[in-house]
Amino acid sequence: MSILKVARMGHPVLRARARALERTDIKKPMVQRLIDDMIDTMTEYRGVGLAAPQVHESLRLFVAVPGADDTAEPDGEPGVFINPEITPVGSDSVDGWEGCLSIPDIRGRVPRAREIIVRALDRKGHPFELFPRDFPARVIQHETDHLDGVLFFDRMRSFESLTFLDEYARYWTKD
Ligand code: ZN
């Protein structure tokens, strides 16, 4: 197990469009080890999701905590999403707080589609489909954005809600 270094805002890798993984590449030890290390890194830094560009690998891959992948099993395996494709369901958009391991100690309110369909490959290269809504849908939209070089600031309607973590805890958690 390895804890990987997380790229912070300003590093160009966070602004690049990541490349898709070939199905034959997914089974390679290098990719499997990267997935394990990303899960360890996400756990170490208490993230709810982590995308490969955040650990300096420009690949269309992210991991998410159990529950964030809509399996509703808090003790389950973390979700692994390779080459994800997202389709919003309906036009319902909800504002919610987000943070990012690449933008430490900052929170802001971001509008996201309430409900989405996500199609991706798992770590064995098998296709799957999920229909998450609310928090899991938010996590998956945030992580998929990382694969296109998009950060949550880019999605904010206004920067008025931008806050440091201490001030968030002090003034905003009653929300
Ligand atoms: Zn992020």
Image (cartoon, rainbow, N blue to C red):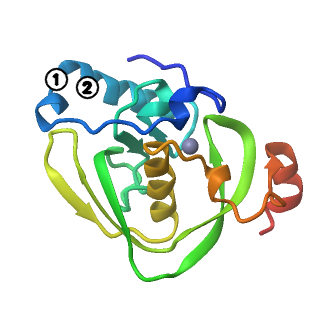
Mark 2: which amino acid?
A: Val
Residue located beneath label 1 in the image: 28
Q: Residue furthest left?
A: 24
Q: Mark 1, residues whose alpha carbon is within 10 Å: few (<14), some, or many (≥20)?
A: few
Residue sitting at 46 percent across and 61 percent down? 136
Secondary structure beneath label 1: loop
- To which quarter of the image does residue 117 belong? bottom left
Residue at 48% across, 20% down: 4
Closest to the observer, 60 or 130? 60
In the figure, residue 32 lies in which quadrant? Answer: top left
Using the image, tell me which numbered label, if any, was put on residue 123: none
**Residue in the image at 43% along x and 43% along y:** 147
In the image, residue 50 sits, relative to residue 87, either above or below, namely above
Q: Position of residue 152 (x, y in %)?
A: 62, 51
Kindly identify which numbered label has been placed on residue 31: 2
Q: Is the residue marked 1 within 8 Å of ligand 1, measured from its CB?
A: no
Horizontal relation, residue 143 to residue 173: left or right:
left
Residue kind at label 1, given as amino acid type = Lys
Quadrant of the rendering where the C terminus is positioned: bottom right
In the figure, is residue 64 to the left or right of 76? right
Left or right placement of residue 98 versus residue 88 in this view: right
Quarter containing the N terminus: top left
Q: Indicate the position of residue 73 as horizontal and vertical percent values.
A: 36, 57
Is 1 positioned to the left or the right of 48 in the image?
left
Please say if the residues under marks 2 and 1 sit with CB atoms less than 8 Å apart.
Answer: yes
Secondary structure state at the residue bearing disc 2:
helix
- Give the quarter the ligand 1 occupies: top right
